[in-house]
Amino acid sequence: MARLRDAKPKNTSGSYARLFGNEALGELASKIQSAVISSGSELESMIVEAVPNIPNLDTFLEQEIMPEGVLLARKREIKRSRTLDFSGSEPDFMVFKRRKGEQNCHIVELKDGHVNRH
């Protein structure tokens, strides 16, 4: 799990320091952003490891009937596809599921965390 104390920001441009008018607070904001990005990357990796991946999305989509179970198309395969056109949007995953003769596809954009406002 990503931790703030382990965060190593790649970019230390000083933009947060200028925004807050305080260098120490700017460095903290950079570390927070770095930790959030790392956390999202860890979540993606866990999903990729847990579900069989589709190596070529176009070849997979040529099938009329997909194999039983759950399969995952990653962002890089979605972007390589010549069959699909997401017109500038880049979902993180496409999840294909076939169970009891029913086939479904889910488009997934991961977001780490949720804010519930009342």
Image (spheres, rainbow, N blue to C red):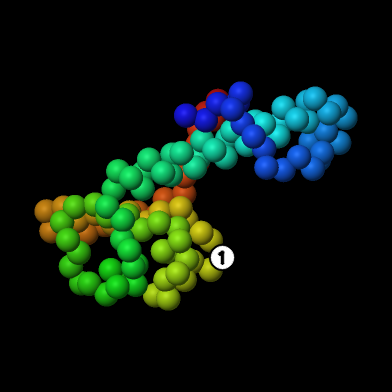
Q: Position of residue 27 (x, y in %)?
A: 75, 30
User: Which residue in the structure is indicated by mark 1?
Assistant: 88
Residue at 47% in and 66% down: 79
Q: Position of residue 2 (x, y in %)?
A: 52, 30
Q: Amino acid at mark 1?
A: Gly
Using the image as rendered, state which of residue 84 and residue 54 is in the foreground: 54
Query: Which residue of the protein is positioned furthest toward the left in this rendering?
Result: 100
Q: Quadrant of residue 66?
A: bottom left
Q: Secondary structure at mark 1?
A: loop
Q: On the picture, is 90 further left or further right than 49?
A: right
Residue at 78% in and 25% down: 25
How many marks on residues? 1
Q: On the picture, is 8 further left or further right than 100?
A: right
Using the image as rendered, state which of residue 11 and residue 22 is in the foreground: 11
Q: Position of residue 74 (x, y in %)?
A: 40, 56
Residue at 36% in and 44% down: 47
The C terminus sits in image quarter: top right
Q: Residues within 10 Å of mark 1 (few under 14, many from 20)?
A: few
Using the image as rendered, state which of residue 57 and residue 100 is in the foreground: 57
Q: Quadrant of residue 54?
A: bottom left
Q: Position of residue 35 (x, y in %)?
A: 59, 33
Is the residue 105 above or below the residue 49 in the image?
Answer: below
Is the residue 102 above or below the residue 48 in the image?
Answer: below
Q: Quadrant of residue 16?
A: top right
Residue 39 visible in image? yes
Residue 33 visible in image? no
Q: On the picture, is 110 further left or further right than 54?
A: right
